[in-house]
Amino acid sequence: MPATREGVRGAVITGWGSALPEKVLTNHDLEKMFDTDHDWIVDRSGIHQRHVGGLTSALSIESGRQALEMSGVDLADIDALVLATTTPDRAVPATASTVQHALGLRCGAFDLNAACSGWVYGLINAHGLIAMGAEKVLLIGTDTLSNITDWTDRGTAILFADGSAASVIEAVDGPGQMLGWDLDSDGSAEKYLYAELGGNLLMEGREVFRRAVRIMVDSATKSMKHAGVSIDDIALVVPHQANIRIISASMDRLGLSMDKAAIVLDRTGNTSSASIPLALNDALDNGRISDGDLVLFVGFGAGMSAASAIVRWTTTAQEHTK
Ligand code: UT7
């Protein structure tokens, strides 16, 4: 995957929002559903609880509305809505159309399925649209994996959950926030994590785990190379929230301590397309990202897909927008 060309028009994130279903399912709740226990789940995955329930459209509308309000953009100025999801409400049309209508937008709208790498794929696509002349893009990452989880299968039901997070991305004069990026997919590994149309997720957990660390480190390394930065320059890593042991092993191989990782996994479980932006928004809301910080997003997922991007954060993003 080539590096960003010199001179393309860049963008910055100017608003964000998060939405989780009200219903919380703890590990102790799962103990009543199948043979498992809280300590095993925490030890093997880092997850304590997850939110479940609702539709991809409804969660997207909630997070999208928050992001639009925070950015203060005029709804008529949004040129595109990109909805990263692997769990659309229906086969046709794109759930993005439902969300667009409910939010009062009139713009291009499409779903993007890159599984757990979806939001980073969407971020790079949004930058591509902006490089081609779009001014403002609403990017939402949402998944309702509870709808495609076999709730009797302890190998998957402990991990997957529902959530949504949105970002408003606006064009700027000049290079913008994104310094480097990488997208990848290895279709030869699709058999390790998939769901047939209308079916539930099937996963070979150990194999996914084994590949995940290598995939995340490879992609992050490529993005750093494209950005011309080293690991010492990274202030915060926002990784896909799949398993705390995957995150920890990846941080270790990258040469970073865990206090440089954004984590929401313990509270949310694996929300696929929503996982990275939920962790980003949590870090932003808790003041973990300062002006000028380099933030590394890195995800992997079914496909097996991978995506990473490095942005130089600016807390005064609005000042840079048109
Ligand atoms: O977005 C990408 C999504 N997917 C992933 O990231 C999945 C990556 N993989 C994983 O996170 C881990 O493989 C799991 C958390 C799914 C499983 O952890 P593990 O350490 O790989 O466990 P394992 O599959 O090797 O199983 C170890 C033992 C087995 O028992 P035996 O055969 O050793 O007697 C399992 O039957 O743990 C048993 N086990 C459980 N025990 C209690 C499997 N699931 C459970 C459970 N509760 N929920």
Image (tube, rainbow, N blue to C red):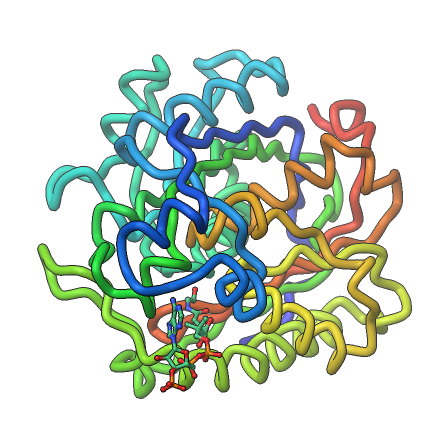
In the figure, is residue 294 to the left or right of 129? right
Looking at the image, which residue is at 28% across and 31% down? 54
Position in image of residue 233 (x %, y %)? 89, 64
Looking at the image, which residue is at 72% across and 30% down? 285
Position in image of residue 120 (x %, y %)? 52, 55
Q: Quadrant of ligand 1?
A: bottom left
In the figure, is residue 147 to the left or right of 221? left
**Which image quarter is the N terminus in?**
bottom right
Q: Which of 167 and 197 is in front in this view?
A: 197
Q: Nearer the viewer, residue 260 or 47?
A: 47
Q: Answer with the quarter of the image where residue 96 lies.
A: top left
Position in image of residue 226 (x %, y %)? 71, 72
Count every numbered label the image shows and give the total. 0
Q: Answer with the quarter of the image where residue 46 lies.
A: bottom right
**Which image quarter is the C terminus in?**
top right
Looking at the image, which residue is at 85% across and 56% down? 235
